[in-house]
Image (cartoon, helix red, strand yellow):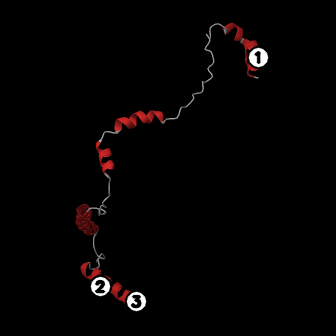
Amino acid sequence: MLVAEREQRQQEKEKVVNESFPPLKLSGLSVQELQDLCKELHKKIDVVDEARYDMEVKVSRNETEIQTLNQKIIGLKGARRPSLKRVKKTTDDMLGACTDNSKLMKADFKANLKTVKKEEEKREEVTDWRKNVEAMSGMEGRKKLFNAGQ
């Protein structure tokens, strides 16, 4: 049954194409008439392309509008908020919340910090490079640097 439906659809397509676009009769036409026919066909193709482009633009606009409307709907619905539960507080908790404990907490903050010892970095003495230029020049100077590195 599926094969029969496919064949029927294919025949319907061919029938619609043949009705809307009759076969061209090119035999017996001169070169000028063929060129005119080509120009006419190109004009028709341009008209169809413009209509297709216009439809694509309309479809893209409608899709973006649908997306924005869906976002607005989601925004209007909003996220469901859970129901709040009652919390029992004693009078001491209520008074503690009213007093300014932030100043007391700042004083305790520094007391709770750990002390960190900083290690001193080894720094080489910066010497004036001009003093030993003659002593370090040549192979003797390079030999001294090599021996000092070992």
To which quarter of the image does residue 48 belong? bottom left
Q: Where does the image place residue 88, in percent across and percent down from the top left?
A: 32, 57
**Compared with residue 112, is residue 32 higher up or lower down, i.e. above or below?**
below
Label 3: state its secondary structure.
helix
Q: Where does the image place residue 126, in percent across and percent down from the top left?
A: 61, 14
Q: CA distance from mark 3 to mark 1?
A: 94 Å
To which quarter of the image does residue 31 belong? bottom left
* 143 or 78: nearer the viewer: 78
The disc at residue 143 is 1
Closer to the camera: disc 2 or disc 1? 1
To which quarter of the image does residue 140 belong? top right
Please rate how many residues cluster around mark 2, counting C-alpha atoms within 10 Å: few if below 14, some from 14 to 19, many from 20.
few
Question: N-terminal of the two: label 3 or label 1?
Answer: 3
The disc at residue 2 is 3
Q: Quadrant of the C terminus?
A: top right
115 left or right of 56 in image: right
Q: Where does the image place residue 123, in percent across and percent down from the top left?
A: 61, 20
Q: Amino acid at mark 3?
A: Leu
Q: Amino acid at mark 1?
A: Lys
Residues marked 2 and 1 touching at CB (< 8 Å): no
149 left or right of 122 in image: right
Q: Mark 2 sits on what residue?
A: 15
Label 2: state its secondary structure.
helix
Q: Amino acid at mark 2?
A: Lys
